[in-house]
Amino acid sequence: MIVVVGAGPAGIAAALRAQECGAKVTIIDDNPAPGGQIWRADSQNSWVARFRASGIPLLSSTRVLSIAAQSNTLLAETEGIPREISYTKLILATGSRELFLPFPGWTLPGIFGVGGLQALAKTGLPVAGKRIVLAGSGPLLLSVGAYLRQHGADVKLIAEQANIQSLAGFAPELLRHPRKVLQGATLQWAIAGVPYRPGCWVEFAEGNGHLERVTVRSAWETWTEDCDYAGIAYGLVPNNELALSLGERPPNVFFPETGEMEFSFVEGEIAGLTAAGYPERTVLLGPKREKARAFAAALASGFALREELKHLARPETIVCRCEDVEYQRLQSQPGFRAAKLQTRCGMGPCQGRICGPATEFLFGWEPSAVRPPVFPALIGSLLPDSPSGTEA
């Protein structure tokens, strides 16, 4: 039995490739439907449709809490119900999440991640007529701007922190991918009339109990934009907690690299073929993988985060939202482990998923060790005799 954790692009690719090789596959995801963050609520996506038609079992709304590599089992929880799942091969296609960097006012209601705002809009948040500012970094700003505008939002500004020189440096690699050029042109057309400002970032946000305005800065000017919502995020970081919790990686566990979508997808294909016992078939995917890797590297370089973002937080700015830890309490700490001990930074419900990458960028701290459970869980799910049964 091959168990795939994650039903986004990499997980779906891995599961389908493994099934093609004759392997028995089960896929687990913490969302109620397949597609991950990228294909969320996209029932027309061809890969999601292919996955649905494959008959591969999907354990939805299920979180993996820990991995017992010695016994090849997972401890998981489905809507509060514990379950133990056996595997012979394990693929951790856990995807990525958005990177948030603290600035004054960033905890105000009405401020979301860029992808988070789109996800909420797809699942019912009314955006028609709402004044929205998008800021941060990466092509997702354009995609979300187009989606929100299509659904009636008044997108007032798209602020990209990378300057025009960095974006121009990315252009030669982009031209090697005609389909992406076409996608970019389509998005530019969809947001025609929306100000797109490279070299700009949100300096602080204000509002009386809810977001009302953001102040935007560039190298030459500062100005204010009134808005109802803001989507602000600075790219993606991998959800690698499960992989890190294993320490040294067992030979029957595979962890596809994450990054740009096509790179994640081909990494998933390679993991699926390898786990199914056909590593020789991955040779044919080598050129596709290298092309996707080169694009992902150029993307990371072109949208590299600027130094000014390290100095947005004021002494009283909250960095760890779960435990209300201020920036000034962290400045004297030598690392993330010490910060946990002295301030409880990273010890709240998100378990460092938000403040961990932020402090790594701000202070250069290395991530602390990951210990199970990797998600908050009911006490009953962690007791040795609590699982309702072993599944295979």
Image (tube, rainbow, N blue to C red):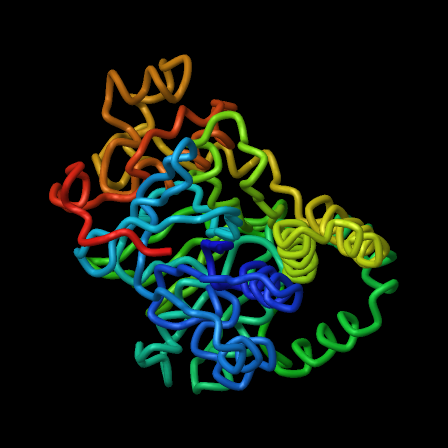
- Is residue 303 shown above or below 327? below
- Residue 73, given in percent of the width and then of the height, sits at 37, 43
- Is residue 255 shown above or below 248? below
| Quadrant of the drawing holding the C terminus | bottom left
- Residue 382, given in percent of the width and then of the height, sits at 19, 39
- Residue 140, given in percent of the width and then of the height, sits at 57, 63
Q: Is residue 249 left or right of residue 315?
A: right
- Is residue 260 shown above or below 35? above
Q: Is residue 170 left or right of residue 363?
A: right
- The residue under the point 38% across, 39% down is 67
Location of residue 301 by image quarter: top right
Q: Nearer the viewer, residue 224 or 313?
A: 313
Q: Is residue 370 left or right of residue 144?
A: left
- The residue under the point 48% across, 63% down is 7
Q: Nearer the viewer, residue 223 or 390?
A: 390
- The residue under the point 36% across, 14% down is 332
Location of residue 337 by image quarter: top left
